[in-house]
Amino acid sequence: MARAYNRRMSAAVEHPAKSRVRRPRTIAETVRLVIGEILITSAVLIALFVGWKVWFNDVVFGASQSRAAEELSEEWRQQPEPEPAASTAPNKPAVLAGLVDGKAFGTIMIPRLGDDYRRPIAEGTGNNVLNTPVLGVGHYSKTQVPGQDGNIVLASHRTAYGGAFHNIHELRVGDHVYLETRDGWYQYTYRNTEYVLASQVEVLSPVPMQPGVEPTDSVLTLTTCNPFLSTAERIIVYNVFTEWFPRSMGAPKEIAHLMKKKA
């Protein structure tokens, strides 16, 4: 019996091809193999697309939006000193007026998000504002404007099209947010963050989340989708008005470096 076993093993060594005869694949196995390869290829392509959408697209659009904001600031810097806008007293902030849908009226600067963080702000929250390489941040037209008591609400994407509000969850107590307009700079100080459902439009009320209540101060509300790559919720970042810097006084020290023309 041992000799017979040894002869079989010897034959297998001398003729390995005979010991490894492959059975032809059935049609079902071939189909499964092809579908598997298609699924793997599709997954790779989707991953590449998401990477482009989330990273490369944001880098390109973000850089373009930053340049647009810089050019807007430079345009205001070169213009003659503007006539004082409507305000109740010299130390009161100018009240912005004459906003036109799709047209930039200001820039937003958030030092916590980078020393050079600056994006344009335009009226409206449609694709003509949020999905363009020269705007990216939009103002809800039915909310208050800089200089008014109430709720100034701005929106932007968390990812894609520049993702201007990608990292607003990083704001901390004491951080400042600046809005620049032709008249000067509005300084807001971070207060708190909350997460709400997309249907909770009460965040747009003059006093956020308290419809019908009369406002007594000015709040800047930043809104974007949450979590990343989802529209299920909204992240809401509240900031309160703390100081007004007319253009004649120059920019606040914290952002003065952004106002210097680059060589």
Image: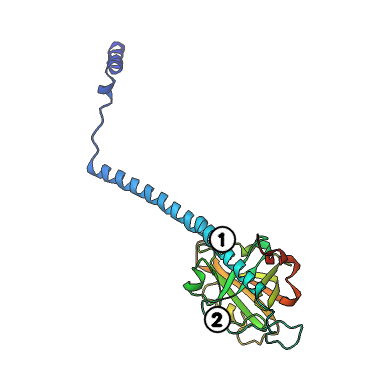
Q: Which residue is mark 2?
A: 141
* Camera-side residue of 218 and 232: 218
Looking at this view, name the residue that lies furthest to the top: 3
Mark closer to the observer (2, 1): 1
Q: Which residue is mark 1?
A: 63
Looking at the image, residue 53 sits to the left or right of residue 94; the answer is left
| Residue 135 at x, y percent in the picture | 54, 70
Q: Residue flagged by tag 2: what amino acid is it?
A: Ser
Q: Which type of secondary structure does the marked residue at label 1 adopt?
A: helix
Q: Is residue 259 above or below residue 60?
A: below
Residue at left offset 68%, top offset 62%: 112
Is residue 65 at all visible to an observer of this figure?
yes
Q: Which mark is residue 165?
A: none
| Residue 138 at x, y percent in the picture | 55, 74
Question: From mark 2 to mark 1, how far is it between C-alphas?
Answer: 26 Å
Task: Look at the image and tell me in which quarter the N terminus lies.
Answer: top left
Residue at left offset 64%, top offset 69%: 74
Its colouring scheme is rainbow
Residue at left offset 37%, top offset 48%: 41
* Camera-side residue of 6 and 181: 181
Give the quadrant of residue 82: bottom right
Looking at the image, residue 21 sits to the left or right of residue 95; the answer is left
Looking at the image, residue 263 sits to the left or right of residue 60; the answer is right
